[in-house]
Amino acid sequence: MASDFWLVVGLGNPGAKYENTRHNMGFMTADVLAERWSVAFADHKGLAKLGKGVMNLQGRNVKFFLAKPLTYMNDSGNAVASISAYYQIEPDHIVVIHDDMDLDFGRIKVKAGGSAGGHNGIKSIDRSLGTPKYARVRMGVGHAARGPRAHDNTVNWVLGGFGPDQRKQLPDFLADGADAAEMIIFDGLAKTQEHFNGR
């Protein structure tokens, strides 16, 4: 029997070294949701920080789990698959929030299915769940400089911090990401896409 819980997963890397880096947009957005809905995180099998909460919007209550995988980005799927199996949460009730270099900073796109777009966390989740058909909130972080050292530039970029301007905009951006996750749960994917993808 599939659970009526939703699972919202913010992707990132654990540890102080990665805090407040572009690759940790998912973690930061998950923290906004945790604060908003009073979710306390506890350990899930050493694979993730996991908390449980209830969203109350539009006169409806929805129970959800909020997860921050501790597996490092490239093995995020191990944590997501473990939680979804343990609590019997189907992929159509999973929302994954992650950074996306193909979008400018501050832009959000929402989708379900489709390619992982080179994002190792998403590739890992696709593999572990055996399907790409779960919702994703893609948080734009902009792109690294191209050129001969493109790979190194990309790694340094996603693991880099934000400039002063972006830091000012970050709280609003993270709040929008949290709103997008909630909207998927309450209003469905199509409506959320209409709201965010055209911006």
Image (spheres, helix red, strand yellow):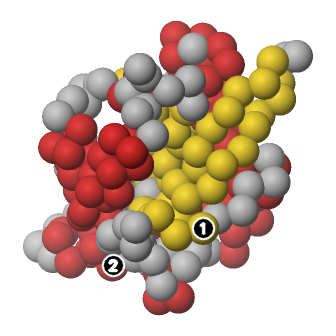
Q: Which residue is mark 2?
A: 156
Kind of residue sitting beneath label 2: Asn
Q: Tell me the residue at 35%/57% (across/down).
A: 79
Specify whether residue 146 is in view: yes
Image position of 56 (left or right of 195): right
Residue ranking furthest to the bottom? 17
**42 vs 195, nearest the viewer:** 42
Q: Dot 2 surroundings within 10 Å: few (below 14), some, or many (20 or more)?
A: some
| Disc 2, SS | helix
Specify whether residue 104 is in view: no
Image position of 167 (left or right of 157): right
Q: Tell me the residue at 44%/57% (across/down).
A: 11
Give the vertical position of 124 relative to 187 (above or below).
below
Cα distance, mark 1 to mark 2? 30 Å
Q: Position of residue 58 (x, y in %)?
A: 85, 17
Contact, mark 1 vs mark 2 (Cβ under 8 Å) = no
Q: Tell me the residue at 25%/30% (across/down).
A: 132
Q: Which residue is mark 1?
A: 42
Kind of residue sitting beneath label 1: Ala
